[in-house]
Amino acid sequence: MTEEYDLIAIGSGGAGLSAAITAAEAGKKVVILERLRVVGGASNFAKGLFAAQSHIQKQEGVDIDPDKVFLQHMEYTSYLTNARLVRAIIDKSADTIQWLDDRGTEFLGVPPLYPYAPRTWHTTKLEGRGITKGLQKHCEKLGVPIHFQIRAKKLIIEGGKVAGLICDDKEGNTVTYRSKTVVIGSGGFANDFDMMRKYTKCGEPTVQMAFGQVGKEGDGVKMAWEAGAAEEGVSVIQRGLAGVMKKKEVLKEAPKKSQFDKHITAILKQPTFWVNANGERFFNESEFSFAHIGNAMSKQPYQILFNMFDDDYRKFMETEGIQVGLGVFAPTGTKIPNVVEAIQSSIDRDEAWVCNTLEELCEKTGQNLEVLKASMDEYNDSCDKGHDALFAKSSEFMKPFRKAPFYAIKGHPTHVGSLGGIKINHKCEVIKKSSKTFLDVIPGLYAAGNVAGGMYSESYDASHTLGLTLAFAYNSGRIAGETAVAYVNKK
Ligand SMILES: Cc1cc2nc3c(=O)[nH]c(=O)nc-3n(C[C@H](O)[C@H](O)[C@H](O)COP(=O)(O)OP(=O)(O)OC[C@H]3O[C@@H](n4cnc5c(N)ncnc54)[C@H](O)[C@@H]3O)c2cc1C
């Protein structure tokens, strides 16, 4: 007879690992199914997670008021989110930092990522991988097996309750797992372009660079919907910084590979003089939220921007350092030893330019010379006056674009995954499509992390709650594990 588990976690990212460990520590029989050959999913690539009132913040004298964070988040999302879920995540967040600390994570601190942002972003040694490796070791200690190269495909529902899963193994054979509960932690649908086109507002997915996304074909979301789950938050993506492209054929094929080089990425992030493909300014460059930059870019021709600076700003970055840090990679004030050298690989690929005249620059970038000149005159005038009457850019970042040679780097839209799809309540139970309340759930089914909706409305803004998506994965995973344990104990 097939053995029966108490809990199956689909996916070994933050959500799946924490659900599985929570249940195993409560004495339950648990297995993790992972589609890939390695543990961690996108959770390996994240740099830090949100918490309010953690022991790390207390050590650093940082006081984050959970009420304030909650109210800010609810206001930002226009109360279109699930307030009880949001509150449950914020309230558990400090305990989760301790929980991870006790299970092998080495925290480094809570550095500021953006100017003006509250210090909620807990960074770790080896980044996200440091957390998942620690938890993988902990699974070994607890005897929780991780079955690799198993792709969960369909839920088994018997008598209206979860009874297991049908999966494919690496040879494509069907494998059946029996279990009283299933926690879906399969991390969204960033690699399913049909879903991205149909549900999200990302724009054409082939012009987006998706960082850290492999094998995210929406399996978890699809199987939950097929089993009768309600839909929530399926349109949201987690936008990243504008990125530099490794390949030239940007608009032709799915540009999976982008270049992450800390210096050029840091330069691209600087609040210089940003214009669109036409040469028009379109944005307040001192707005640092990735979501807001990405949203604004998505409305521009080809969804691209040109980050432009002049020779004085080049010198400034070399001698004074960057004005806006790139997290732990290049903190604010980092001096770029040689800007031309830093952007040389992009110059070689026709993705960045150094030109002595605007005419030459426009010839190379394809911008309209008249439009660019007008944008430049208006911008320089604002710099001289110390007030940006167009977009109210913060005056500390108003540096003119005047002295040749002129530098331009093309920035492409990026994202790090879809956020949402399955409707859950604050206990991470999956709500039925037919339900009129938060109580009518599919018994034995839970969702956590990027597959679950209810946390975000239009966009995910990282500036007030830095690290919230990774924190959501670990906190909702723990909550899903606890709720599943209570369900198994009652049976
Ligand atoms: C480059 C990058 C940087 C980021 N930085 C941050 C940051 O600093 N702070 C922050 O808060 N967030 C950040 N994020 C976002 C954060 O990493 C995610 O929100 C979070 O990791 C999601 O966790 P998850 O467990 O839901 O999904 P994942 O960690 O992606 O795990 C899902 C797992 O499920 C597996 N899987 C998929 N389908 C199946 C299937 N059918 N069967 C079995 N297994 C399956 C996948 O292979 C994967 O291992 C970043 C993301 C990226 C990519």
Image: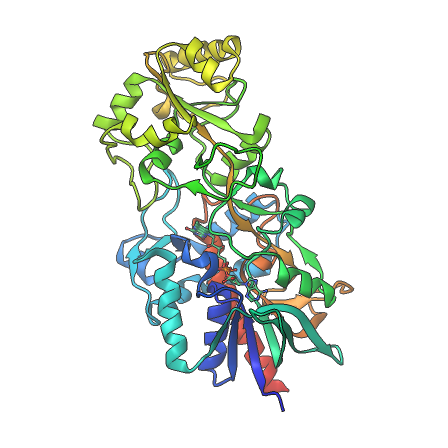
Q: Nearer the viewer, residue 482 or 173?
A: 173
Q: Image quadrant of residue 143?
A: bottom left
Question: Which quadrant holds the N terminus?
Answer: bottom right
- Residue lying farthest bottom? 1
Is 274 located above or below residue 290 in the figure?
A: above
- Residue toward you, 145 or 320: 145
For image coordinates 39% across by 24% down, the residue present is 272
- Left or right side of 93 for 220: right
Residue drawn at x 39%, y 42% is 117
Residue 356, x across and y down, in percent: 35, 11
Report the side of 192 relative to 249 (left or right).
right
Residue appearing at x 47%, y 56% in the figure: 42
387 to 25, vertically: above or below: above
In the displayed image of the protein, which residue is found farthest to the front? Answer: 171
What scheme was used to colour the molecule? rainbow
- Say if residue 98 shows up in the picture: no
Percent of width and height locating residue 400: 36, 16
Q: In this orientation, does residue 314 appear?
A: yes
Where is residue 457 drawn, in percent x and y?
61, 47
Name which quarter of the figure residue 251 lies in: top right
Q: Nearer the viewer, residue 44 or 486?
A: 44
Say which residue appears at 41% left-offset and 76% top-offset.
139
Q: Say which quadrant the C terminus sits in.
A: bottom right
Residue 479 in percent (x, y) is at: 52, 69
Q: Relative to 145, is 368 above or below?
A: above
- Number of callouts: 0
